[in-house]
Amino acid sequence: MKRILVLATMVLAFVLVLGACGNGDDGAAAVVPGEGEAWTGTLNIWSFTDEAERQAIIFQGMHPEVNVEFQMVGMDGGAYEEWVLTALAAGGTTVPDVIYLEAGFVRAFVMGPLLQGLDDLMPLAREIEMYQFVIDIGSYDGEVRAFSWQATPGVMYYRRSIAEEVFGTSDPATIQNYFRDLDNTIASARRIR
């Protein structure tokens, strides 16, 4: 439970700085404050999902001195992407502090010039043992530009009798090696077929 709470706190911290270039007012801090430092101002969060709103409410409860403003636009026909891209390209006071990105288009944002670097949060990411693939997806050209608030690693089930027949063993550690990456998974699937 403690690890989940630490992760939830880390997620909120990452979410706070994921956003674009900042809006230039006295709004949200551009970095995670240290112990004893207070958050002040306004934090503008944009998302395509109401899950982000729940996180914003939790953050607001933890930091009542911050005015959290949440806006949501649906994904219909690329409306959210267009809304965010237009705001980021225009700059000025229309730029949100935090944006949520979907797996289907996160790389386009990460590889572009519109997100600020988040390398200063890497020690915290390492401390909570964040999955490397989450860091990789949010990185481009050696710089971390986004973090994920969730990760969905996969799992594989297998029948021991088939594993014995095909691979000569049903030992999970040995079987895992046959599926350790995409190339091995494809080769193993062909072998099973």
Image (spheres, rainbow, N blue to C red):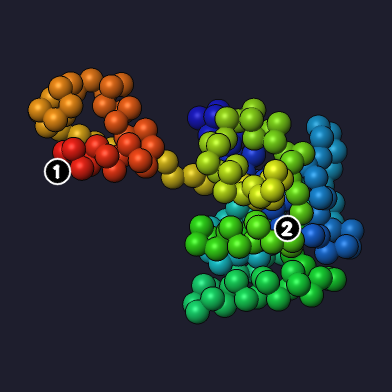
Give the mark, 2 or 1, whose residue is nearer the N terminus: 2
Q: Which residue is mark 2?
A: 115
> Residue 14: where, in percent of width, then height?
67, 46
Measure how far apart labels 2 and 1 are at the Cα level: 45 Å
Residue type, mark 2 in image: Leu
> Residue 86: where, in percent of width, then height?
71, 76
The reply to whether callout 2 and callout 1 are in contact (CB within 8 Å) is no
Residue type, mark 1 in image: Arg
The residue lying toward the viewer, choosing from 126 and 179, is: 179
Tag 1 secondary structure: loop
Q: Residues within 10 Å of mark 2 (few under 14, many from 20)?
A: many
Name the residue: 58% across, 59% down: 106
Which label number is shown at residue 193? 1
Q: Residues within 10 Å of mark 1 (few under 14, many from 20)?
A: few
Name the image quarter holding residue 10: top right
Name the image quarter holding residue 115: bottom right
